[in-house]
Image (cartoon, rainbow, N blue to C red):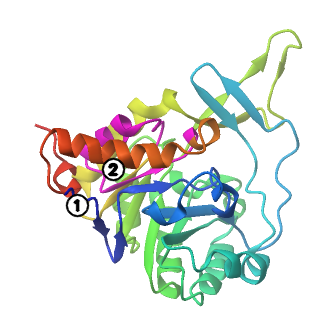
Amino acid sequence: MVDLSVKIAHLNLKNPVMTASGTFGYGEEFRDFVDLGRLGGIVVKAVTGDNRDGNAYPRMAETPSGMLNSVGLQNKGVDYFIKEIYPAIKDFDTNVIVNVSGSTIEEYVAVAEKINELKKIPAIELNISCPNVKQGGMVFGTNPSIATEVTSAVRKVYKRDLIVKLSPNVTSIQEMAKAVVDGGADIISLINTLLGMAIDADKRKPILSTITGGLSGPAIKPVALRMVWQVSNAVKVPVIGMGGIMNATDAIEFMLAGASAVQVGTANFIDPTITMKIIDGIEAYCRLYKIRSVKELIGGLN
């Protein structure tokens, strides 16, 4: 038997395969395709303080090796989530984690404070790739001092595991990782999307209404692997890796680079059953190489 279980901070995962926020809805949308109870965890789509309609269309664009999106954190706000969504997902037989987003530190804190009251949500994932309106649009996750400040503010009101999701659009990912650990992060997840752009040559116009958007998919995997390796060697907290994971081999590579668990994102759009295949593939790999516990893979580069 292969032991696929991992523990990150206080989270007990049946296996290291989780889903990435914004690519798996609230989990219910995939019930016809996968056994949700087999997943290590589900990170639901972003929750903000108030209703957000998102950005104008078009807000998604396909590229040869990934996709660009600028959805804009579309959701109906934290109160709607608590009243309408939480009752439907709270009894899933897996870790249900809420991605918390905001435009001010006060909004992050308000959302986290309300989620803290939900007993069956064992962790939140703080998305600090949002523009800080009080700083003229500067992204929280590109300035170490602001990243520490927002993490620390949320840490004061949120009492369970605090995951902070890092933006790759920085000069030093290690510096950002240390900043959020200083602020009280229990776990770090990375990477979020890389900033990119698509152009319609016939119309001579940008494809996205916002001009730029977040690039995900296979194209970003080498960057993500490098950053996961750097962060796992820079801080002592567990790391969740993501970015272009399309199959079990990709997931295993992230664990070898230092990730204790992985999140699968864009691949869910291509194959709704991909998470099940990745779990099976990791187990098959461990059997092939006579690895008794998947934990042996974490940081297992020779």
Give the quarter of the image for residue 272. top right
- In percent of the image, x 81 and y 26: which residue is there? 207
Does 50 appear above or below 225?
below
Tell whether 73 sits left or right of 236.
Answer: right
What separation in Å lies between label 2 and label 1 (alpha carbons)? Answer: 31 Å
User: Who comes first in sequence, dot 2 or dot 1?
Assistant: 1
Q: Is residue 127 magenta?
A: no
Q: Is residue 194 visible?
A: yes
Tell whether 13 sits left or right of 220.
Answer: left
* Camera-nearest label, 2 or 1: 1
Quadrant where the N terminus sits is bottom left
Which segment is the magenta one?
243-267
Tell whether 199 sits left or right of 300.
Answer: right
Viewer-closest of 29 and 54: 29
Which class describes the residues within 10 Å of circle 2: few (<14), some (14-19), or many (20+)? some
- Badge 2 is on which residue? 174
- Badge 1 is on which residue? 3
